[in-house]
């Protein structure tokens, strides 16, 4: 065995049969999030360019767009096998990016295009990542997910590190519009990884798995969600995730708009936040995520994020200033990506295949962005009533405390379901 093979076996917590699928999953997530993180600072700057007062409307527009897109996605999943509908989704987003590049290059309706782009990136992020994690939940069992999802997530984190670096270095000399071409290249690389991953997965799952349709109805997601208390609990967890993230995002937008002037300076701050989050997350995913999930379980791992929000909102109650907002934003995103998100993805390894693609997408996309829209208007309304950032943070504390309790309950249920699924597998 060469030194590289020995290092690889230590670095990747996969069996020899899982190794190829784990590495292609890593590469797939790397390319996907590298492309997204090239776009994210542009989205945040364009959100401010359109005026912070327009943010609730942009969040609402995102939710309405997702409501319209959800049944279309459900129909695609029902009619096409996994090996076909996943590339179709990403090629569609590539075509959209090419259109945005043309509009921005020609300077057509820049304010309107900026607002539409903000909405589009928010839709793209959720759909693209939700499709990825649905694929992962379909490929790997609960036990495999605990071992591998941290490593696979590290691929996305590494891509998330590269994206901000590209934006920081090239945003001024190339201009924002030309960075869309970079994102297109990364998305096409992600599609290539999908094809390679299907080939690797065929070895472990059987060659027909990727060609087998999920089936069912285009509108099956909502009934699946409503008849499952477990999935309703996961949906509530995701809605509370949106509550914390949206509240903090609006705080960040208002504080940055008030204290940092100039599109270039604002874009660099957002990109620097992304870079700091990426470095912390990558180190945690490589060295700690798998061990923490195996030792403490999904409940503790998922609960780590609301615990951070409890501390963060308490700090913002006392000191609602730029540096505190930035620190809390970095820490909560670090904890989300490194610990809580892998735990949340493991939640879905114990549900049926149709639920993994339809109900999961409804939760990760529509429920999340619907919650974004709702909480965006809540933030705007309480500000209109005269509450300042410190007072809003104080009001948020009991909500995130309830989120912490829900995390523990979901973790216990997931472990029971995983144990029941493992019994037949051991008897085969």
Image: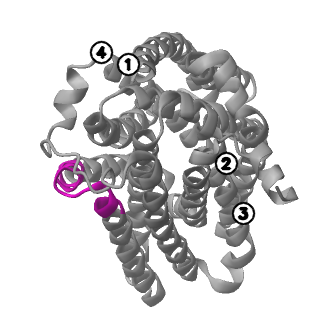
For label 4, the SS is helix
Sequence-first tag of 4 and 3 = 4
What is the spatial separation of the Cα atoms under label 4 and label 3, in whole angstroms? 43 Å
The residue that mark 2 highlights is: 154
CB atoms of marks 4 and 3 within 8 Å: no
Sequence-first tag of 2 and 4 = 2
- Label 3 environment density (alpha carbons within 10 Å; few <14, some 14–19, many ≥20): many
Viewer-side label of 3, 2: 2
Identify the image quadrant of residue 117.
Answer: bottom left
For label 1, the SS is helix
Question: Which is nearer the eye, 418 or 270?
Answer: 418
Residue range in magenta is 70-86
Viewer-side label of 1, 4: 1
Sequence-first tag of 2 and 1 = 2
- Residue positioned 31% across, 46% down in the render: 63
**Residue 82 is inside the magenta segment:** yes
């Amino acid at each position: 065995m060469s030194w590289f093979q020995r290092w690889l076996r230590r670095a990747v917590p996969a069996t020899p049969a899982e190794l190829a699928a784990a590495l292609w999953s890593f590469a797939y997530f790397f390319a996907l999030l590298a492309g997204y993180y090239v776009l994210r600072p542009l989205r945040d700057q364009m959100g401010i360019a359109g005026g912070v007062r327009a943010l609730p409307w942009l969040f609402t527009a995102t939710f309405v767009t997702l409501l319209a897109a959800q049944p279309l996605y459900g129909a695609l999943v029902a009619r096409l096998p996994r090996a076909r509908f996943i590339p179709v989704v990403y090629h569609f987003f590539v075509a959209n990016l090419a259109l945005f590049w043309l509009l921005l290059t020609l300077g057509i309706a820049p304010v309107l295009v900026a607002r539409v782009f903000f909405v589009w990136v928010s839709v793209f992020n959720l759909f693209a990542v939700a499709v990825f994690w649905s694929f992962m939940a379909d490929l790997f069992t609960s036990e495999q997910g605990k071992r591998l999802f941290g490593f696979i997530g590290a691929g996305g984190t590494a891509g998330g590190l590269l994206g901000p670096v590209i934006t920081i270095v090239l945003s001024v000399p190339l201009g924002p519009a030309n960075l869309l071409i970079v994102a297109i290249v990364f998305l096409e690389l992600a599609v290539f990884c999908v094809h390679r991953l299907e080939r690797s997965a065929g070895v472990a799952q059987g060659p027909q798995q990727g060609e087998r349709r999920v089936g069912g109805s285009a509108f099956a997601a909502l009934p699946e969600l409503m008849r499952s208390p477990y999935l309703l609990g996961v949906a509530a967890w995701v809605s509370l995730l949106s509550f914390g993230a949206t509240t903090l995002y609006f705080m960040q937008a208002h504080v940055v708009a008030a204290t940092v002037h100039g599109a270039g300076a604002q874009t660099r701050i957002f990109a620097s936040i992304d870079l700091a989050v990426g470095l912390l997350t990558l180190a945690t995913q490589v060295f700690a995520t798998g061990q923490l999930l195996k030792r403490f379980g999904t409940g503790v791992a998922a609960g780590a994020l609301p615990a951070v929000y409890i501390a963060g909102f308490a700090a913002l109650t006392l000191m609602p200033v730029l540096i505190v907002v930035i620190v809390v934003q970095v820490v909560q995103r670090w904890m989300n990506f490194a610990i809580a998100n892998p735990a949340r993805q493991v939640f879905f390894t114990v549900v049926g295949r149709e639920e993994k693609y339809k109900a999961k997408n409804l939760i990760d996309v529509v429920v999340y962005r619907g919650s974004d829209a709702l909480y965006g208007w809540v933030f705007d309304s309480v500000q209109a009533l005269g509450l300042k950032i410190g007072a809003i943070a104080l009001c948020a504390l009991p909500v995130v405390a309830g989120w912490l309790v829900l995390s523990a309950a979901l973790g216990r249920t997931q472990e029971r379901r995983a144990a029941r699924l493992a019994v037949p597998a051991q008897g085969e």
